[in-house]
Image (spheres, rainbow, N blue to C red):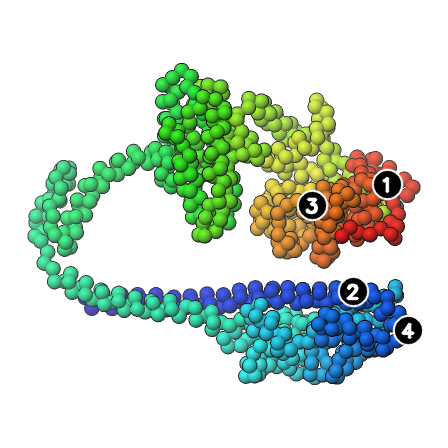
Amino acid sequence: MLFFAWLLATVLAIVFALVTTASYQIARQQSRDDLRVGRRVFNHLVDQNHERLIQSANVLTSDFGLRAAVASRDVPTIASALQNHQRRIGSDIALLSDVDGTPVADTLDGPQPGGPELAPVLREAELRGSATGILVVGARAYDIVTVPVLAPQPLGWLTLGFRVDDDFTRELAALTSLEISFLHLDAGRWRVLASTRGHSEQDALLGAVADAGPLLEPQSATLPGYETELVAAGNPQGATAVALQSSTARAVARFDELRATLLVLSALGIGGALVGSIVIAGRITRPIQALAARARRMQEGHYVDAVEDFGADEIGKFAETFEHMRAAIVARESEIRRLAFVDVLTGLPNRMAFQEDLAQRLAASPAPRLAVLMIDLDRFKDVNDTLGHAAGDAVLRVAAQRLAGVLRGYDRVYRFGGDEFALLIAAKDAAEAESVVSRIRLTIEEDVSIDGEPVDVGCSIGIALCPDHGTEASLLVRRADIATHESKRSRAGATIYDPARDDVRRERLNLLGELRRAVQGEQLTAFYQPKCALPDGRVVGAEALVRWQHPARGLVPPGEFIPFAEQTGAIRLVTRWMIAQAARQCGAWLAAGHELEVSLNVSARDLLDRDLVDAVREAIAANGIPPRLLCLEITESSLMEDPRTAHETVSRLHALGVQLAIDDYGTGYSSLAYVKRLPVSELKIDRAFVMNMTKHPEDAAIVRSTIELGHNLRLRVVAEGVETEAEIELLTALGCDVVQGYLVSRPLPAAQFDAWLAQDGARKRFTAPATNVRPIA
């Protein structure tokens, strides 16, 4: 009894130690996660503040009166304008400097900034057109932005900002859930400008960074009870920093209740073990010989009679186990028969039950009026991949319940496996079957709640009617399955089997085999559509597009074989061929003195192909071209099919030196957070927005915001599908970098492209737009 009590206590002590260690580790990780999230929120808030200040500064610098006053050095007028604008926007500093950084006028009531304080900010503004940072004036600090005063040449610099004090840091701390301190390196020593911490905590923080010099890169600091990170605060010399701190102690405190509960349970467990051991030790066992004799009878195969009850002690439990074994043999055989025809997860009849029921119904009548419905859940794979298989199982159980709920008395639902269900219903015609299908779709497409989160799951349904589409079980199932695939492909929701689809499927299979031979038999041709820079119209590259010249069918449009090739995986053959052709043509142009970037499309299946990078590397090496002259265009939807693998492939291509572009931007569903992490250099605006932007302000607004987004992410922006001069003028006014479309040229074979390129004026296809062109708001 004492041994088992000691053993239990030892195990519980080990468990408590492991839980305590794990809790601390989890708390540390939670603190790091809070610090990382808070840092992002902090950066976003500071960027928003700067953006508002820059907009306000641009409004003031565009005022004709101010520019005239600056040009004439009318200091009273300048000071009045600064004071009025400061009151209007509620800023704490408004300062105007001349072009060499000498302050001309300001609204400060304390120490005035000199040239040395402003010089780093002005140098950055000269490089970037505007600048942000922390300006330290005596004991005060300001979060500022600086923009030029242009007329049109620079006349001076306007600086606006808010004071960085304890109130400012407390506001940021309330929004980020972090402790925030602004630090400044003064004469080799850090001092606190503003902080949410007390004086003792500030002293500890300064002690931790005492040996740190100028801060140019983010770095961590070691402080008891806090995860601390130091980041530069906009000073090019690294003389100003922000200390962001997340409390580890606060995270650890969340687990105190768990540890207390575990201690109480441990004490109760040990006490219970002692009491139980005393009770068990006090029991007297039944005669062993009687149980042994019964065991010999069971060994001889006599399972009819139940095992005698010997009580609740050890021998009684042993006898009870024998009785359970006897009963389990009968139950197990019954369960085996049940499992052969029932799906364990949903409780529905399975595929074998479906086949048996369908065969019975077909055998009962020469031509029964019934329908076979095959149901495939849409977006189920996304649920499994995102929320886990437990959530997927929950969705399947809900779908099974809903399907069973819409059935009539003579209908039956089955689960085939995965996300596939089947229904066997009585239907005299297609209209009756479609009526049942409508009810099924309404109930399936209602949101499913998983752990309190709504999950959107749809379905694709294929319908095969008996005897219209066959009277054999296998034929009805195959044709219902064909209708399901067609429904999923067309996103129609539900589709009745159409015999013509069999011909289409056979035609596609034939086309697939011919496509493989086309790649080997030189039936494919690469066409090239020029890409021209704005505003001068220089030819800077070309997009490679595949064309199939079939010996019997003639020119097969890409829309007839590319989508099918993507579904079957044959697109990889086409992509490999196009990579080789594009690299070869790029090398030929380079040898002829034309340094043109050649771009081509890659599909979602290509991004999942781990050999794609090797194929690109080999094509570049074989043709001796710089990797930067090859650009791979990727759609948003292809990136989101398997984001992790796609990101890995894109990163490897970027490391190779190949240019990457996001094609048809705005038509997919990728998040900006995901896009900005990709190592892309180009953003292509979909032609659907470009072709309507001169007619519809909404499309123009989308184009403008996409261009601004691309430039903010330091990406080159390309507009495709340009067909009119009006579109060129508007794109130029909006700051678009490159255009392509029929206005420049249709896609051309390589030889015709060379001739087009050699024409007089080919390097300047159009001129800059008139100055009165204004973007649509």
Of residues 669 and 272, which is closer to you in this image? 669
Label 3 belongs to which residue? 663
Callouts 3 and 4 close, C-beta under 8 Å: no
Q: Residue at left 11%, top 60%? A: 283
Q: Is residue 514 left or right of residue 359?
A: right
> Residue 2 vs residue 75: left or right?
left
Which residue shows up at 63% across the image and 35% down it?
A: 563
Residue 729: percent from the left, percent from the top? 83, 47
Q: Quadrant of the rendered structure where residue 222 is?
A: bottom right
Tell me: residue 460, above or below residue 156: above
Helix, strand or loop at disc 2? helix
Q: CA distance from mark 1 to mark 4?
A: 52 Å
- Disc 2 versus disc 3: distance between alpha carbons? 35 Å
Whether the residues at callouts 2 and 1 have beta carbons within 8 Å, the answer is: no
Residue 505 drawn at (x, y percent):
58, 26
Q: Which mark is residue 757?
A: 1
The residue sitting at 51% across, 49% down in the picture is 386
Q: Nearer the viewer, residue 694 or 12?
A: 694
Q: Amino acid at mark 4?
A: Ser
Q: Percent x, y for residue 21?
A: 41, 68
